[in-house]
């Protein structure tokens, strides 16, 4: 797929995996629309890339529709990358044996899973209505972000694992459905990545986490995620799959 003159939309694009992806896509010739919360550094990040910032909560249909419309004004929407998400830990029972508030579970699943689905639906409609790429015949590719927690969830991650497991599980049926429009759907399941949240930990804690990875024994880098996104965009035979990007780690129970 040739990204020159095409549009790309990246949720959670103001930092971490999302911003690294926005940088890669911009360098490849795409006009990038960064979607993130109004409180984020989205305006500054979009300005760095010569792109557009569309403030939006991914769970809000109207805000996401406005973000997709902004992206299509920059060119045919060919790439959508879902990086928006949260990961607060919460056990089923707290230290006193009381049930964790159901609202906490619902909020995490709503942002990570329902938000991803909302973006997929709105973006797919815009892609399906566009003319196919003149070189490949593709209309676009949607890349979602799951997590190794979808497969190796740890204690304290029931909501996070459920949300990311849902992203993994819906990848194939959506890819099968959107195949008729020439739209591919692929998911990446990152391991322990060097995100802003982890970068805030003491260096000793970061090193300890990195040592759990078989090889290379370090945290994954955002640009390695972004590089895989670009390969998915370029490799037209990747579809309906979840790809682990984790240095061969399999998470322990805690």
Image (spheres, rainbow, N blue to C red):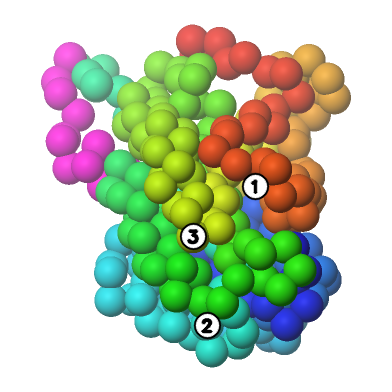
Residue 53, compared with residue 203, is above or below; it is below
Q: Which residue is mark 2?
A: 72
Q: CA distance from mark 3 to mark 1?
A: 34 Å
Residue 204, compared with residue 85, is above or below; it is above
Which picture quadrant has residue 228? top right
CB-based contact (under 8 Å), mark 1 and mark 2: no
In the image, 104 versus 137, the foreground residue is 137
**Magenta residue span:** 97-108
Q: Is residue 101 magenta?
A: yes
Can residue 213 be seen? yes
Residue at 78%, 77% (x, y): give it.
4
CB-based contact (under 8 Å), mark 3 and mark 1: no
Dot 1 lies on which element?
Answer: loop
Is label 1 or label 2 in front?
Answer: 2
In percent of width and height, residue 249 lies at 68, 18
Q: Which mark is residue 181?
A: 3
Instruction: Please tell me how crowded label 2 is: few (under 14), some (14-19), or many (20+) other residues with Cα within 10 Å.
Output: many
Q: Quadrant of the N terminus?
A: bottom right
In percent of width and height, residue 141 lies at 59, 57
Can residue 37 be seen? no
CB-based contact (under 8 Å), mark 3 and mark 2: no
Q: Which residue is mark 1?
A: 195
Q: Is residue 120 magenta?
A: no
Name the side, left or right, on which 147 lies relative to 4. Answer: left
């Amino acid at each position: 797929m040739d990204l020159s003159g095409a549009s790309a939309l990246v949720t959670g694009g103001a930092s971490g995996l999302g911003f690294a992806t926005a940088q890669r896509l911009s360098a490849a010739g795409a006009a990038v629309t960064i979607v993130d919360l109004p409180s984020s550094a989205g305006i500054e990040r979009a300005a760095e890339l010569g792109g557009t910032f569309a403030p939006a909560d991914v769970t809000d249909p109207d805000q996401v529709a406005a973000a997709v419309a902004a992206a299509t004004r920059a060119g045919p929407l060919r790439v959508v990358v879902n990086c928006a998400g949260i990961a607060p830990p919460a056990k089923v029972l707290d230290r006193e044996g009381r049930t964790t508030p159901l609202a906490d579970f619902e909020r995490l699943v709503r942002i990570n899973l329902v938000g991803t689905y909302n973006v997929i639906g709105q973006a797919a409609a815009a892609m399906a209505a566009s003319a196919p790429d003149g070189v490949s015949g593709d209309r676009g590719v949607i890349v979602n972000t799951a997590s190794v927690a979808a497969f190796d969830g740890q204690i304290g991650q029931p909501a996070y694992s459920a949300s990311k497991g849902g992203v993994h599980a819906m990848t194939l049926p959506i890819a099968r459905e959107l195949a008729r429009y020439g739209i591919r759907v692929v998911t990446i399941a990152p391991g322990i990545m060097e995100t802003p949240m982890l970068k805030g930990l003491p260096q000793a804690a970061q090193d300890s986490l990195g040592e759990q990875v078989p090889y290379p024994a370090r945290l994954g880098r955002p640009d390695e995620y972004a590089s895989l996104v670009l390969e998915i965009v370029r490799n037209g035979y990747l579809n309906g799959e979840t790809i682990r990007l984790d240095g061969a780690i399999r998470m322990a129970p805690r």
